[in-house]
Image (cartoon, rainbow, N blue to C red):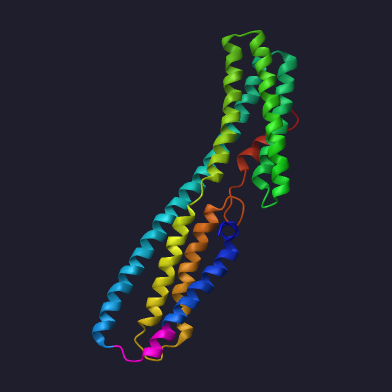
Amino acid sequence: MSFLLDYPLIFLLVSFMLLWVSAQTGGWLRRRRRHVDEAEHEDLGTIQGAALTLLALIIGFTFSMAVGRYDQRKNFEEAEANAIGTEYVRADLLPAADAARVRQLLKNYLEQRIMFYTTGHDTGLLDRVNAATGRLQTDLWSAVQAPAGAQPTPVAALAISGMNDVLNSQGYTQAAIWNRIPTAAWVLMLVIGVACNLLVGYNARQEHAKPRWFFLLPAIVAVSFFLIADMDSPRGGVILVAPQNLVSLSQSLRGQ
């Protein structure tokens, strides 16, 4: 399940086929029974309407969750760029040699953060980026801790505080990427979607309902699932968080 959610286009195809087969199965069951009285049609119609309403509500709430998580990742990318840019300026508060080292480390760290956002599902490259980021974080903290410890002044404390924001912003970003829509919510949506399509196929008014029309509801629901999965997936799909603030900061620091 997690594999499919990381590849929304594949999830779109799989979910559409599952829902389409459900609608076809409902139509097949309806044709086998043949005789369904009007009262049963009305009862099934009530259940079908309630199930579709429930599915729409759950899709709406889940879509809202996905949008919130996408906006959160965008905000943390902006916060990372602001924290790195602020600390780059505050490096001037340190002795000249230490300031030059901190600025160079920040440039290297900035490049790693850009690679973190632009790396897709290449787990090997992502592991190398995370390892390099961890080493740079250790070097950055040491670069500001040593001079601040030698001369513990309020001015040096600003450099320490700024570096703390840089390190914390990376942790917040990672937590936001791990914060995905629970698998249980996806299972619930799929189960209700399958049930709705079964009911639509079974409760078709025509005794010999044309199966080719049964693709409409599966297509609508599958596209909704795709959009939710696409926004919820931090590394796959069409809608991704581009590190535009980090790239802009990197371009502004070139030559400095």
Q: Which residues are magenta?
A: 27-36
Q: Quadrant of residue 177?
A: top right
* Residue 255, position as x, y percentages in the image: 76, 30
Q: Nearer the viewer, residue 251 or 157?
A: 157
Residue 187 shown left or right of residue 244 in the figure? left
Q: Position of residue 106 (x, y in %)?
A: 69, 29
Give the quarter of the image for residue 127. top right
Q: Is residue 30 magenta?
A: yes
Locate residue 242, reporting x and y percent.
Answer: 61, 47
Q: Is residue 155 above or below residue 36?
A: above
- Residue found at x 70% / y 13%: 95
Task: Confirm whether the magenta stretch covers residue 247.
Answer: no
The C terminus, quarter of image = top right
Can residue 251 be seen in this snapshot? no
| Residue in view at x 43 percent, y 66 percent | 191
Q: Position of residue 226 (x, y in %)?
A: 52, 62
Residue name at image x 44 percent, y 88 percent: 210
Dominant secondary structure of the residues highlighted in magenta in the image = helix
- In this orientation, does residue 239 appear? yes
Query: What's the residue at 60%, 58% (across, down)?
Result: 3
| Quadrant of the rendering where the N terminus is positioned | bottom right
